[in-house]
Image (cartoon, coloured by chain):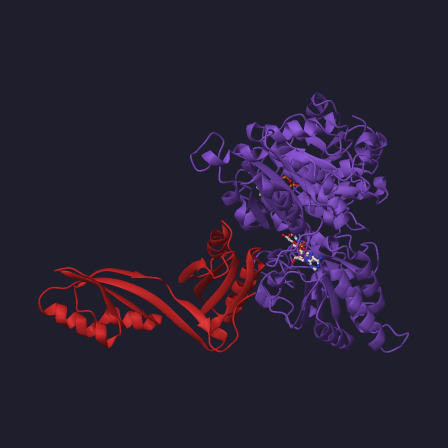
Amino acid sequence: MRHIIAVLLENEAGALSRVAGLFSARGYNIESLTVAPTDDPTLSRMTLVTTGNDDVVEQIKKQLNKLIDTVKLLDLSEGPHIEREMMMIKVRAERQDREELKRLTEIFRAKIIDVTDTSYVIELTGASKKLDAFIGAVPEGLIVEVVRSGPTGISRGDKGLTI
Amino acid sequence: MALSEAQSVGADPERPERSGVELSGAEIVIQALADEGVEFVFGYPGGAVLHIYDALFRQESVKHILVRHEQGASHAADGYARATGKCGVCLVTSGPGATNAVTGIATAYMDSIPMVILTGQVPTPVIGSDAFQEVDTVGITRPCVKHNFLVKDVRDLAVTIRKAFYIAMSGRPGPVVVDIPKDVTDPNIKIPYDYPRDVKMRSYNPVLKGHPGQIRKAVDLILQAKRPVFYTGGGVVLGEASAQLTDFVRTTGFPVTSTLMGLGAYPMTDPQFIGMLGMHGTYEANMAMHETDVLIAIGARFDDRVTGKIEHFCPHAKIIHVDVDPSSISKNVKVHVPIVGQVANVLADMLKLYRELAPRSDEQPVAAWWTKIAEWRGVDCLQYDRNSAAIKPQFAVETLYKVTDGDLYLTSDVGQHQMFAAQFYPFDKPRRWINSGGLGTMGFGLPAAMGVQLAFPDAQVACISGEASILMCIQELATCLQYGLPVKVILLNNGYMGMVRQWQEFFYESRYSNSYVDALPDFVKLAESFGHVGMRVDRPADLEAAMTEAFAMKNRLVFMDVIVDPTENVYPMIAAGKGHHEMHLAPSLSDRELA
Ligand SMILES: Cc1cc2nc3c(=O)[nH]c(=O)nc-3n(C[C@H](O)[C@H](O)[C@H](O)COP(=O)(O)OP(=O)(O)OC[C@H]3O[C@@H](n4cnc5c(N)ncnc54)[C@H](O)[C@@H]3O)c2cc1C
Ligand SMILES: Cc1ncc(C[n+]2csc(CCOP(=O)(O)OP(=O)(O)O)c2C)c(N)n1
Ligand SMILES: [Mg+2]
């Protein structure tokens, strides 16, 4: 099963490589990993997406918790949560394709954030599936470049993953 | 140097406070070690640590032991830690100094041994420039340490060293590397020294007490057990819980088996002890595992050398598991009652509750189970040919036991000799059997014995080894001479990498590919050339007298080259992928009807 796990880490040099190293050393799957400092500059928040059966995911969480830099961990998939990923996609936009792409952008509530005579850069935020769908909807051969942030997530309700 | 000198060095709680004094980074390193109560630093100098070596030279509270190879430093610190329960410390230079120490760091990591390893690093401005003797020590050691640090500012040095000791010693112990660039130890930059007494880390809070609800569940299960077994491991030794374990086991009257790493935590000569379990465990221990209905696992990690094939592991049992590291629980084998906590606390709580709830009765609660175990014991699975003309390795270990009166610190290398020692030397105390179980590092034994002998200068310390293993850290014989360490090396010389040869005999139709140890040195002369006493014995009848003579030389290192039967195998053996009930027994037993 797919799990999305949020981790609060000490914002120390090397904390990220400890997590990455853990996954490769123990042969765990890792689909994506995003990390950035939080409002408290001494803390980083990481979101990682992994797959595995229940036992494997349980071990992954225990091993993450065991890292000395890990302050707190939450498996967002265990409760109601919101997941968002950001994508920027550069497409060839010429003649009638310009209109088509604009319409697609509206339908998906995306934004065109860069325009040239021959191209657009479109920004889209949403659940990963929605980004997949957008990519699927772009007419054949128009995609120049896709960049995705990997998912981040937050739990619903008034409780927060803080210290 | 006399040993008594070494003994007098050490922690002094009455030591004058040095906080507030202006010190350089190098001086801070040494003062911090002194404040930690460190007696010995095992190390080897080099460019990146020269400032630190200069600071060492100008003080007396921390004693430096100059090894002959950095692997020796890490194993010696490890041996010291295993024997004393204190933190082992080493100091090595950047680049090759650090890489040489890695095998010892990984060895300590696999067996959860507390160590602090100080490594020199190139100066901060040139980090990343492929500078002379630069390696990414933090990167190289990351997968084999509990934690590591790179200190980039002298003001972080004292607190980082304090954290390193705290992390190494608390929770599930382990090695911690502190990488120190040369400029951070600059003798010309002095700052006020302040060593933090306490350290709090919001991201690291090891659990101490077990959950009362879980303890209750465990005791309920234990009270219902018909065929219970205690399966104990290195965690009992590491957690200083030998007394609590012994109390609990004696109170319940249940049988107890131990992993290789837990030997001695429960007295091995006690009738309730049914021998080691696992790949080379006893018939009775492994059969009891196979038949048990309640398995009480204490500070053991369900290693594959213990479980055999997981599908066959304890097929009838409800499993209780006490461990301080949640990630050890249900990692390989799913357990029914997990208890996270320090063994000593959990065992004491369990015993208290057990005493409250157990019905008063004089009857042995699991008498039928003991009858069954007695039958398995009757098989006498460790029997060997006592009339052999060649010295049997088993006989050599039995003789060692006799000559040392069971009062010995025994370190080991890796191979058949290690297994024979585990099977034939019954330790009655923890921290007496010192060996590399998890990594299985050949070369561990001799340097580890140095660490033990330094810690206990008056104790009998021996290293059991094989002719292949001993050559991996033989250079440390020089260290032993320099510091007057009267270790006894018991070399079970079978002319083969015996353990490898045994697998090739069993699983590769006796094709002995590269397991014959050709071109061996004359070990007697070799020992003598290092300034020690060498002895060779090749007849069973001479062994006891020779060993007695060796141990009588209280102030000399004696290297005993004991020529043993080259064809002997370690039995019982569970082949990889087999269950506990599928043991290979000694040829003399294999045609017998087994219980
Ligand atoms: C040639 C060879 C053959 C071997 N054959 C065998 C064999 O036949 N049988 C065998 O048993 N082993 C054998 N081994 C050793 C084996 O590889 C493992 O090292 C060993 O089984 C692990 O022992 P353990 O489970 O006690 O774990 P350890 O490595 O000692 O781990 C200790 C456990 O206790 C926990 N712990 C630590 N401190 C505490 C505390 N204070 N409170 C609570 N929990 C704590 C830790 O988290 C960990 O889970 C062999 C090794 C070699 C090299
Ligand atoms: C550093 C290292 N290399 C290789 C091995 C694999 N290995 C395990 S036992 C063994 C043979 C040991 O031979 P010896 O020291 O003579 O001991 P014996 O088995 O003969 O008692 C080898 C090569 C190891 N454990 N460690
Ligand atoms: Mg050999």
Q: Is residue B45 above or below residue B429?
A: above
Q: Residue at x 40, y 62 (%)?
A: A32
Q: Is residue A36 visible?
A: yes
Q: Quadrant of the image for the N terminus of chain B?
A: top right
Instruction: State the image quarter where residue B435 is shown.
Output: top right
Report the front residue among B258 and A144: A144
Q: How many marks?
A: 0
Chain ID, purple in image: B
Q: Is residue B446 visible?
A: no
Q: Is residue B511 above or below residue A97?
A: above
Which tint is chain A?
red
Q: Position of residue B434 (x, y in %)?
A: 72, 45
Ligand 1 resides in the quarter of the picture at: bottom right
Q: Position of residue B44 (x, y in %)?
A: 62, 30
Q: Quadrant of the image for the C terminus of chain B?
A: bottom right
Report the front residue among B455 and B63: B63
Instruction: State the image quarter where residue B455 is shown.
Output: top right
Q: Is residue B265 left or right of residue B128?
A: right
Q: Position of residue B554 (x, y in %)?
A: 84, 31
Q: Is residue B542 left or right of residue B135?
A: right
Q: Is residue B121 left or right of residue B568?
A: left
Report the front residue among B24 and B537: B24
Instruction: State the image quarter where residue B405 is shown.
Output: top right
Q: Residue at x 75, y 72 (%)?
A: B227
Q: Residue furthest left?
A: A95
